[in-house]
Image (cartoon, rainbow, N blue to C red):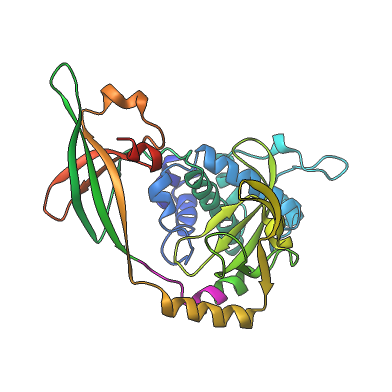
Amino acid sequence: MGEDALNRLGCGDKGDQAQLGALTRGQRQTTSQGLFTAADNLESLYADTALTNLFQDLHNGRTPLSFREVTTQMGLSLVDENGALIQGKIPNVPQFLNRLLSLKTDRQNQVFDLFEHRLVEAVEYAKQQGIYDEGLQTLRAQSIVKTRDDRVYTHKTGAVTRYVELDVTNAIEYLQWDEVSAKMDSRGASNDSVSGWYVWAHGKCKGRVFYLADRGTRINSDGLETHRGVLYGIRKGARRYIDNAQEIARGIGVRMVGGVPRLVQLAHRISPEQAERRWHEELAAAPATETTTKGMLVGAILPIWDRLTGSEIIYRLQADAGEQLLGRLLEGRTAQQT
């Protein structure tokens, strides 16, 4: 979306838009090239959240840039007489993009990159929480094989609802050690007491290595202040956002064990050398593909729509045999009860 979306915002004349367009073209090797195609709107709730997080992090010294220098050059006055950030004075996204033009090109790229990373975080966090509205989606995979097709409901008009099960196979992409170590080195540890390499000591991922990057204070979907971090494992693109970064860093937390809350060891901090050895071991043992079974309702879905739970996203797909399907994916217990 990049350049087109910026043009739609009407941010300056064509020369200005060309400068902003340079921020989103391919020469900027960002981690979020696919974001704008998915979100397709820089004036969304997620963009507002990203912008608030950006100025909070700038003000709290959690970026490589100077809050005072950036806001002065952008002509923004965002603090009170005591130096506290005034939330109500943070500009909206169109204003932010216009003010961005007052910066030199290199600094434009730096500030927009910080904003972009936080927009990725806001969108991916919403998806992770199941509250992101994506509309009609196409389910793509290396292989899609239909293994079940049952009639589950017939409306009085004769319209039929069918439940199908699909074996969906995808190739798994992995992060090589050189990729992930370079990424972590370039990011830098913003908080040495949190950011670093760890090994899970509890749960289904016990024994696996991961990197925890501190993301600072955030407001979650319930409006509560949390300390967010992002976890990186060997799978490419499988980073996961958490709201208990400090608890993971401490390594100890309360979890249910046998139905009883107990204090357990969650993770152990390890050195980069230990992490590299474990990373290579996990890569050597990792499978090339993964097959999951997905349940899907197709046909007349509206008559039973209010009985369904979970995501309301509608998917379209084409199975290996050539059959095209359009319907709603079911998750967990809902699929089992169909």
Res 313 visible: no
Residue sitting farthest toward the right: 82
Q: Relative to 320, does residue 226 appear above or below in the rendering?
A: above
Residue at x 62% of width, y 74% of height: 185
Query: So how many labels did they put on this image?
Result: 0
Given residues 233 and 217, the one toward you in this image is 233
Residue 94: in magenta span = no
Q: Is residue 220 left or right of residue 291?
A: right
Q: Relative to 75, does residue 305 appear above or below in the rendering?
A: above
Given residues 221 and 22, the one toward you in this image is 221
Residue at x 29% of width, y 44% of height: 295
Res 180 visible: yes
Magenta region: 172-181
Residue sitting farthest toward the front: 258
Residue at x 49% of width, y 53% of height: 20
Q: Quadrant of the C terminus?
A: top left
